[in-house]
Image (cartoon, grey):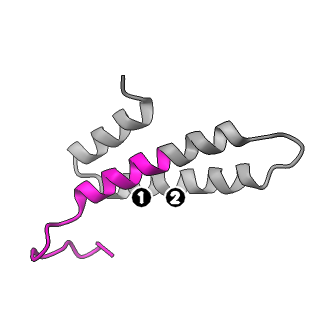
């Protein structure tokens, strides 16, 4: 069964919305940094979940990369 993040990423990939994926990636990285800075509780499970989501988002961005030898879009970095 797909997770919510997999469905969201698949939707963004389908409509080729790289900007939305990069925003989502940035947000999840921020959440991960905040979780890792928490003291007094063990955020291990949440950190693992966010890391898994980051992998899914990064895989979606890879799908949107232009093929080697093609002309990349102007904002592709």
* 67 in magenta: yes
Q: Which residue position is annotated with label 2?
A: 26
Compare residues 27 and 35 and report the one nearer the observer.
35
Q: How many marks?
A: 2
* Label 2 CA crowd tier, 10 Å (few <14, some 14–19, many 20+): few
Q: Quadrant of residue 7?
A: top left
Bounds of the magenta segment:
53-77
Residue 71 image point, x, y percent: 12, 76
Q: Identify whether 7 is placed above or below 64.
A: above
Helix, strand or loop for disc 1? helix
Q: CA distance from mark 2 to mark 1?
A: 6 Å
Q: Which residue is mark 1?
A: 22
Residue 51 vertical position relative to residue 8 in the rendered view, above or below: below
Question: Picture quarter containing residue 62?
Answer: bottom left
Q: Residue at x 14, y 73 (%)?
A: 68
Give the quarter of the image for residue 58: bottom left
| Circles 2 and 1 in contact, beta carbons < 8 Å | yes
Does 21 appear in magenta?
no
Query: In screen coordinates, is 53 left or right of 34?
Result: left
Q: Secondary structure at mark 2?
A: helix
* Residue 29 vertical position relative to residue 74 in the rendered view, above or below: above
Residue 54, horizontal then vertical, whole percent: 48, 50
Judge left or right: residue 70 versus residue 49: left
Disc sitting over residue 42 in the figure? none
Q: Is residue 48 left or right of residue 53?
A: right
- Above or below residue 16? Residue 40 is above
Q: Quadrant of the C terminus?
A: bottom left
- What residue appears at the point 21 percent right and 43 percent down from the top-left corner? 14
The residue most toward the top is: 1
């Amino acid at each position: 069964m797909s997770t919510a993040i997999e469905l969201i990423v698949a939707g963004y990939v389908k409509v080729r919305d790289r900007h939305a994926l990069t925003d989502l990636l940035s947000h999840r990285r921020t959440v991960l940094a905040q979780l890792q800075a928490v003291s007094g509780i063990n955020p291990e499970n949440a950190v693992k979940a966010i890391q898994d989501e980051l992998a899914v988002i990064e895989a979606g961005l890879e799908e949107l990369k232009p093929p080697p030898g093609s002309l990349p879009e102007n904002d592709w970095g």
